[in-house]
Image (cartoon, rainbow, N blue to C red):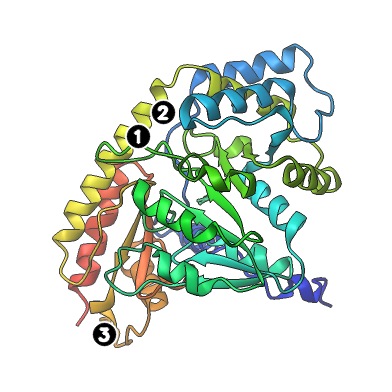
Amino acid sequence: MSFASSRIAWVKPSASAWVSQAAKEAKARGEDVIDLGLGEPDFDTPNHIKEAAHQAALRGETKYPPTSCTLEMRQAVLDKLKRENNLDYALDEVIVSNGAKQVLFNALMATLEPGDEVLLCAPYFGQYKDIVLILGGVPVLLEYPAGAGFRLKPEQLSEAITPKTRWLLLNQPSNTSGTVYSDAEIVSLGAVLADHQRVLVLSDEIYEHILFDGRIFRSFAALCPHLKDRTLTVNGVSKSYAMTGWRIGYGAGPIGLIAAMTKVQSQVSSGACSIAQAAAAAALNGPQNDVRRFRAAFERLRDLVVARIEDIPGLTLDPPGGAFYGLIGCEALIGTTTHDGATVASDADVTTYRLKAAGVAAAPGSAYNLSPFFRISTAASEEELIKALDGIAKAVADLK
Ligand code: PLP
């Protein structure tokens, strides 16, 4: 008997979860596997943040929190957005949820009519498309011609907009390609949207602090103030503060949108965990030296991966400008043969072969609507990354 409704039956686990599951199964069989599938910092949450959670629990902050967010976290988010992003929001223009993922879900649930189109920039964070489909929307995938550096161009955006377009989902630094747009590029995308009053912008800024080569991050709404009243700025503490398990993300946007999202949240989960909110407020309000330490470490790992991939014939990598992923091109491997005679016909085959031959788990580009590539998370220890890249080099060299 199937328990899944037709709305949900076709939904596959996310690519990174699928790859991690395959890695766990291989480990359970006693194989030596390095999991570069999940986008999760290898650091522990800083102690002052854990201590804030401890103190909140001891103070008795153990009751249902307000649906949208605690007062302390609301203020912390407002202060952060002002201080770091030069964005002014009012008290009722903020929502805190169980991760940025729930902020996204709330926003789309609150706004999509059946058949509404959502523009996604491939390669994109895997969940975007599935969330849109679950909610009865139509994902419209904007793909980039080879060599365009994984960047949406204004002409392409303009052509894609129809009377049904409801959202543009923009994520930078990008999971999966590490693309970071210049300020001028963002401004030119914003100019296209100026005349399309029905289109909302979701600016997913969760990797804002993981930025390389001296780049400075600027929020979409700050660069395009004329669109602030239809932009939802999405962020969270998972990546910047090594807090993936605390499940706190936040959104800031126009009051009507936040009110509708709060309505959704009230029916689904109520307010996010009060203790995790206290920890997240301490993260935003407290010393930021750990954020800087993490960023520097991620940049060193990025350099290591770029240098090593350059030395592997058959693989390519555009140096990521931010985030902690490497989107590795593997076109030259398509059509080769493995030592047991199987033909490598797609990046999914590369994924299966690499896991078997090198013990390295990582998602195929097809999961992000871009082939032939595979995505490794560089948020691992240096030792693991070196071992994984050595394994990949040998597995690639063994293909005929
Ligand atoms: N947005 C992007 C682009 C992500 O890569 C992720 C997590 O991988 C999320 C949102 C969700 O983050 P959170 O842990 O806050 O739910």
Alpha carbon separation for disc pair 2 and 3: 44 Å
Q: Is residue 376 above or below residue 53?
A: below
Which circle marks residue 337 in the picture?
3
Residue 9 at x, y = what percent?
73, 74
Label ID, residue 295: 1
The mark nearer the N terminus, 1 or 3, is 1
Callout 2 amino acid: Val
Task: Judge whether residue 176 can be spotted in this image.
Answer: yes
**Left or right: 268 in relation to 366:** right
- Helix, strand or loop status at disc 1: helix
Residue depicted at x 42% and y 39% = 218
Q: Secondary structure at mark 3?
A: loop
The answer to whether marks 1 and 2 mark residues whose Cβ atoms lie closer than 8 Å is: yes
> Few, some or many C-alpha atoms within 10 Å of disc 3 (few <14, some 14-19, many ≥20)?
some
Q: Percent from the top left, x then y, of residue 388?
A: 29, 55
Task: Confirm or reject: label 3 Cβ below 8 Å from ligand 1.
Answer: no
The tag on residue 103 is none
Viewer-proximal residue among 44 and 207: 207
Amino acid at circle 3: Thr
Residue corresponding to mark 2: 291
| Amino acid type, callout 1 | Arg
